[in-house]
Amino acid sequence: MHVIDSHTGGMPTRVILDGGPDLGSGPQEFRARKLATEYEAFYKSVLLEPRGQPGMVAALLVDPVDPSCETGVIFFDVDAVLGMCGHGTIGLGVTLAHLGRIGTGSHKIETPVGVVTIDVLDPNTVRVINVESRRVQIAVTLETKNYGTVTGDVAYGGNWFFIVEPSPIPVVSDNIRQMTDMAIEIREACVAQRIGGENQESVDHVIFQGTSPNAGVHSRNFVLCPDDQYDRSPCGTGSSARLACLAAAGRLAPGDEILQESVIGSPYRLSYQPGSNGGVTPSLTGQAYVMAEGKLIFDDHDPFRSGIYS
Ligand code: PYC
């Protein structure tokens, strides 16, 4: 199994070029469901330690249904198959450019939630035009066990988000452990109280939206991912959901650009255009760097070939 590892603002992506399971040739949504339900051991083995690392997202390349797309891709972390992944798409764009498969310019990528466009601006900088994103609930109140009442918006950006603004604690790296614990409780409360998408989709990510000490930066976020890790990047799908909330609240005009930072300070440039179904079409620009090229080996004699389960 050939892989290329990159990071986008510190958040790792492992692109799987070949050697993944045969998921058939149906719509990407069906293939993603097949991966989630029939190949859990495979996707965990790619990302669990010692082969993988905490927070890492994999991008399994598959043939696109639409031949005008450069590739199909299914993203997953160690605990879930994702609808979309913004940092992973930036990492994928940089990886495909590194391989010489694409050059600067515009390319279409097919994901389980729809076709996204990438603009490769230079070998390390990619703009993603994401799927239409929307705010679906405003100022929802939920009860948590240890943190009392929490209020936030529910929004879609390719994955499902509960967005708390302002963050209950400063969004700084010293608070990552505390924010992680709090966000896990909030996600559990969302599921228990059936707070999610219009069709009962579960909230799978939680965002705390805070301020940045850096001049010119609009905001800084902490994002909890399904694997209980925080996003080292500003989270592309989370930033898309956030743009939908800013637009719906009249706080950001179409075309206006803002700079958003992750909790470790890595930046994305964000803007949107009105979507065709009442939401927004987000644009996010970030940088990724290739770190390693390799071949994953699954040795039958290796007691940890499937990863370390804890
Ligand atoms: O960038 O959309 C994103 C993302 C989702 C999970 C981790 N990163």
Image (spheres, helix red, strand yellow):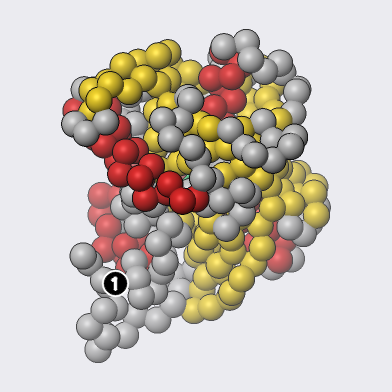
Query: What percent of the width, then of the height, locates residue 73?
Result: 51, 51
Horizontal side of 44 relative to 117 (left or right) equals left
Q: Could you tell me which residue is drawn at 27 percent across and 57 percent down?
A: 40
Question: For mark 1, does the 10 Å Cα neighbourhood hold few (<14), some (14 to 19), or many (20 or more) residues?
Answer: some
- Which quadrant holds residue 137? top left
Q: Could you tell me which residue is drawn at 39 percent across and 74 percent down?
A: 51
- Which quadrant holds residue 151? top left
Please state which amino acid type lies under the numbered disc 1. Answer: Gly
Horizontal side of 254 relative to 279 (left or right) equals right
Query: What percent of the width, then of the height, locates residue 168?
Result: 41, 30
**What residue did someone put label 1 on?**
307
**Viewer-proximal residue among 176 and 288:** 176
- Quadrant where the C terminus sits is bottom left
Q: Could you tell me which residue is drawn at 43 percent across and 57 percent down?
A: 55
Query: What percent of the width, then of the height, locates residue 236?
Result: 56, 40
Q: Is residue 310 above or below residue 171?
A: below
Q: Secondary structure at mark 1?
A: loop
Horizontal side of 168 relative to 305 (left or right) equals right
- Which quadrant holds residue 108? top right
